[in-house]
Amino acid sequence: MATLIAVNVGLPQDVAWKGRTTRTGIWKRPVEGPRMVRRLNIDGDGQGDLGGHGGPFRAVLVYQLDSYRYWQDHLGRDDFVHGQFGENFTVDGLPDDEVCIGDRYRIGDALFEVTQPRVTCYRVGLRMNEPRMPALLVAHGRPGFYLKVLAEGLVQAGDDIIKIADGPGGMTVADIDALLYKADHPQAHLERALRITALSPGWRASMQLLLDEAHGTGASTGNAGLTGAGAVPPPAWQGFRPLTVTAIVPESSDVFSLLLGAPDGDPLPAALPGQFVTVRMQPDPQGPSLIRSYSLSGQPGDPSYRISIKQEPHGVGSAYLRRHAAVHDTLDVAAPRGAFVLGETSAPVVLISAGVGVTPVLAMLHSLAAMKHPHQVWWIHGARDGVEHPFAREVGALLSGLPAGHRYIAYSRPRDDDRLGEDYDGVGRLSGAVLTGLDLPPEARAYVCGPTAFMDDMTAALVGCRLEPSRIHTEIFGSVSAITPGVLPADARAPHAPASPPGPGTGPSVSFARSSLTVPWDSGYGTLLDLAEACDVPVRWSCRSGVCHTCETALVSGRVDYSPDPIDAPADGNVLICCSRPHQDVIIDL
């Protein structure tokens, strides 16, 4: 019979790490005597990052003495104490390759159900003083697991662990962990996992995404269960290719479009509606290149690409193209990319944009109009006035061809010659009250593009209109919003060259496309993630060891080397910046 060896608790604390401060509850210590286990945790325990840990499906973390012995031998260490792996229950027995999701156990006065494997994040590496630990736990099939508390009660070290029910699917913790994180995702196993009602909602969502991908075209090469970046097909070509400017079209007072075609006149590879291309320009033949990304705004499948560009007051790239681009000129263009794409179309669709955020959702509208989408399509757009309202006639024509097309156009400052009811439908900015008044279908999929604050407001408003958050998709122009779990916020700084590089920086150049920054590589950085952080480039990560794919980013051009190798490789054309270094000059979509 399995036994509870130690009950470990710890409240979140601030820990110095990599020149920053992270808040974490990973330091757990054994307690004497009985402790009350409640629905969300154990008395005296807490989690520092409730986005990644804690909650009813992750109330208690379990780790086994057998794995302690395994890691002591594998790592050559003898300094482990109970709670070493951040677990609440140190147990003798209950191996990951035998315990199944949905198994139920009585410990002391409390009743528990197994819900999911441990989510591997960097903090277990921080606690262990071993940065590779998140990847090692998965690679060696020893993650540990979480318990849901079905009945609260007192527990204490020495309690027997009594199994009272078997999980209905017969899938072990190690099985489920490998199914998500490793490269093989058999469809039958995914379907089996989704039949286990005890599996936590987060893991169910990941399994469903993997299954949806298996039912799809099969064109993607990444892990759709971990990141949307892994769910799209690989780019049609690597690096840049020359495209010819075939037309220049003014769209409004501050937006113009460039039509780009193949020099030989052949049709360009089809893009997905919502994707973008990256353009490389050389204003000064002796100076650095300018690298900018622009959404495709035309009909997906057209033989040429249309990019639409807003002339920003201090925009170097937009100013260069406005002043110097001419028909028959050649631009270096990378293949269409991006995971902000029109998904399944068996439901109503809501397209919301502000300003030049209209461009990717316009491509989606083109696609919906071409298929004569039978369900409701809502076009919701905010502009200053009719002069700054691009694509107005084009959108009107597309909506008129849809069986159930609707629109709401808001002008914040309409001009005297702007016509209410014809050019626009309301005065002011788009808001939650406006969306509520439109009676949007709650089963719709929504796509939102515009400034960050606008997208946050619209997302909250859509949730208020009873749309599921998982059905709301957003696209950010410029730098991505950072994901740095547990790291306490600091004053934001614009991306810059490193203030104190570790060496002379004689390696390949690294260009962060969204941040308009190019810097030389130095091996002292360790990884591309380390370099990005030294430059204050906004980044996203969690495990920092090639497991979770939170950091997966488009590799626009160049090649990288991995150390360590990822547990599951990123999609073709992408890179995991947490465990890679540039092999040659690289351009990254950050």
Image: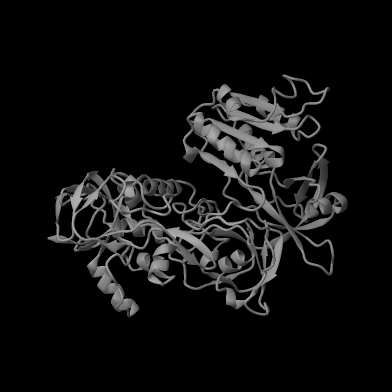
- Please state, as top left, top right, bottom left or bottom right, where the N terminus lies in the image: bottom left
Locate residue 504, reporting x and y percent. 68, 80
State whether residue 202 is above or below residue 178: above
Locate residue 211, reporting x and y percent. 40, 48
Residue placed most toward the observer, 384 or 80: 80
State whether residue 430 is above or below residue 40: above
Q: From the viewer's perspective, tell me whether residue 234 is left or right of residue 12.
A: right
- Please state, as top left, top right, bottom left or bottom right, where the C terminus lies in the image: bottom right
Q: How many marks?
A: 0
Locate residue 343, reporting x and y percent. 53, 41
Image quadrant in which you'd find residue 237: bottom right
Q: Is residue 486 visible from the viewing direction of this image?
A: yes
Residue placed most toward the observer, 188 or 70: 70
Locate residue 82, reporting x and y percent. 27, 67
Residue placed most toward the observer, 545 or 223: 545
Residue placed most toward the observer, 114 or 445: 114
Residue visible at 36% across and 63% down in the picture: 27
Q: From the viewer's perspective, tell me whether residue 402 is left or right of residue 100.
A: right
> Of all residues shown, which one is farthest toward the top?
421
